[in-house]
Image (cartoon, rainbow, N blue to C red):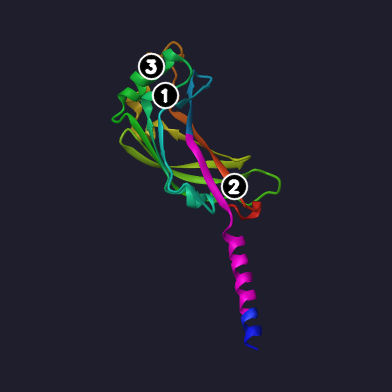
Amino acid sequence: MKNVILSALLVLTFAFTANASQKSGCTLAQNGQIEVTWTGYKTPKKVGVGGAFDKVTYAPVASSGSDFRSILVGSSVVIDASSVNSKHEDRDAKLAQFFFGLMSDKNINAKILDIKADKRVKNAPRTGTLSVLIEMNGVKRATPMTYTFSDGIFEAKGSIDLLDFSASKALAGINEACFDLHEGKTWSDVGIGFKTKIEATLCKVKTIK
């Protein structure tokens, strides 16, 4: 009788452990650094000019976890604004001197505050929203962004208004330095984005958040 009870307990323990393992077996791992991008706009026709930053220090809250929240919320970056790179040497020099050089701090700081997933759509990339705290020119603003996750790439996009960061002086500076090229118009709204690689292991599509 004791052997029967012991066997039953072992079976139940194994079953419980297996179920727990299935629920917590999903692992998301961040691989490499984050690429931070931007898009500025010039001329009355609002022509976009894109670029990135070469010096970005990323501090992930965790290198791996069971969902996006556990590895992204709390993660932060420090961006050296002088490393702006639009693949145009003369433009980058002007941005560094007449735009970022007129701000109170050479660094831009950002931290992910929250993440929310959209309802899952079958055979479509995973999507959702982020709240990101951005600190620039001594001003902090919580900024909404949308994200997609597909083929191991997590990418987020959003927009800021430079005037929300008390950057009218910097905006006027770059507009004056590039007056002819910008046809007298440099827009205050700027597209922002970042992307990073996230490897999913033992994850069922429906359980990733």
Residue 159's x, y, as percent? 48, 35
Rate crowding at label 3 as few (under 14), some (14 to 19) or many (20 or more) other CA atoms within 10 Å: some
Q: Which contiguous range is marked in magenta?
A: 9-34
Q: Is residue 145 left or right of residue 207?
A: left
Q: Amino acid at mark 2?
A: Ala
Residue at point 37% right, 14% down? 177
Residue at point 62% right, 52% down? 202
Q: Give the mark toward the camera: 2 or 3.
A: 2
Which one is in front, 36 or 9? 9
Q: Is residue 20 magenta?
A: yes
Cβ–Cβ under 8 Å for marks 2 and 1:
no
Cβ–Cβ under 8 Å for marks 3 and 1:
no
Residue at point 58% right, 65% down? 20
Q: Which mark is residue 84?
A: 1
Which one is in front, 128 or 173? 128
Name the residue carrying label 3: 94
Looking at the image, is mark 2 or mark 1 earlier in the sequence?
A: 1
Residue lying at the far front of the rendered structure: 3
Q: Which mark is residue 157?
A: none
Residue 154's x, y, as percent? 56, 40
Q: Is residue 206 magenta?
A: no
Name the residue carrying label 2: 200
Say above or below: 24 vs 108: below
